[in-house]
Image: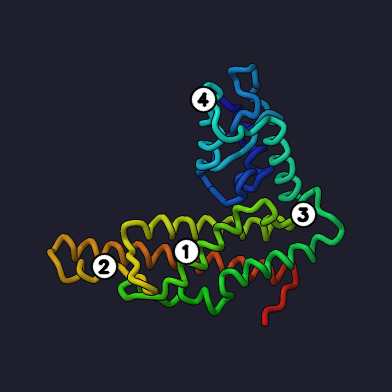
Amino acid sequence: MWPPEVKSKAMLACGRRCCLCHKFAGVAMECHHIVPKSKRGEDTFENCIPLCLDCHTEVGHYSDDHPKGTKFTPEELRGHRDHWYAAHASGVRSDAPSDYIELDRKLYKKIYAVLGGSTGMLHFSTHDYGGSFSAKIQDRVYQFTYLCDLPETEFFDAEVSAALADLLEAVNRYLRDCVNRLWQDGEVMHVPPEWLHGTEQQEKRFDEAVDVLNKASTGVWDSFTQLVKTARSRLKIEHD
């Protein structure tokens, strides 16, 4: 059981953002033992890394009896934590080079281009999912998630990094909500229109799907807008 003072200190140090994925998790945070209690790890601030529920599950579910993938080592967890604590405290990662702003600008412009810029992302602000839309929209957000999986897709600026993490979380939530709610016909995607003209249960399913997707889409737009505003403020980005 973590002492309250250790948990409070850890939450302040990370800003209630996960030390691995950097998304804001609010109350959905866990303190993870870097060295497990089963191996005499202590309930101390030095042995604590704050994680969101998703990352806590990912870190905690590795089985030494059936090893698959690559386990998070204590040294790696400490490194992620210390980098994020330092970035949250100073606004910039401790390992940032002197020209980090130019590197961050280059990465931001790459992400912005993959997403199609504000014009391409406007779909998420204006589209009603009761109607169809171009499958190219989905292709762009999938390309964005693939880009974010690359190790070099990480900002040195803490605030921009946090805004990117929030956008990735919103996009992943949107894509999860699309499953079994959106169908693709050639170059067009839509909620199945036959639901709207089917049984009463199908009509309810159509309305529910539209409502869920509209809300998830708004979340993507809000997070994208925040990333743009943060980049303009922190990196002095000028958009064409």
Dot placed on the residue nearer the N-terminal end, 4 or 2? 4
Dot placed on the residue nearer the N-terminal end, 1 or 2? 2
Q: Closer to the observer: label 4 or label 2?
A: 4
Which amino acid is tagged 4? Answer: His
69 is higher (above) or lower (below) than 127: above
Query: Residue 201: where, in percent of width, then height?
Result: 16, 60
Q: Residues within 10 Å of mark 3 (few under 14, many from 20)?
A: many
Dot placed on the residue nearer the N-terminal end, 4 or 1? 4
- Residue at which label 1 appears: 219
Q: Secondary structure at mark 2?
A: loop
Residue 92: give its label.
3
Residue pictured at 49% horizontal, 65% vertical: 220
Q: Residues within 10 Å of mark 4 (few under 14, many from 20)?
A: few
Q: Residues within 10 Å of mark 1 (few under 14, many from 20)?
A: many
- Residue at which label 2 appears: 192
Q: Is residue 221 left or right of residue 4?
A: left
Q: Residues within 10 Å of mark 2 (few under 14, many from 20)?
A: many
Residue pictured at 76% horizontal, 51% vertical: 93
Residue 66: give its label.
4
Q: Quadrant of the C terminus?
A: bottom right
Which amino acid is tagged 1? Answer: Gly
Query: Residue 224: where, in percent of width, then height?
Result: 56, 67
Q: Secondary structure at mark 1?
A: helix
User: For residue 73, what is the image quadrant?
Assistant: top right
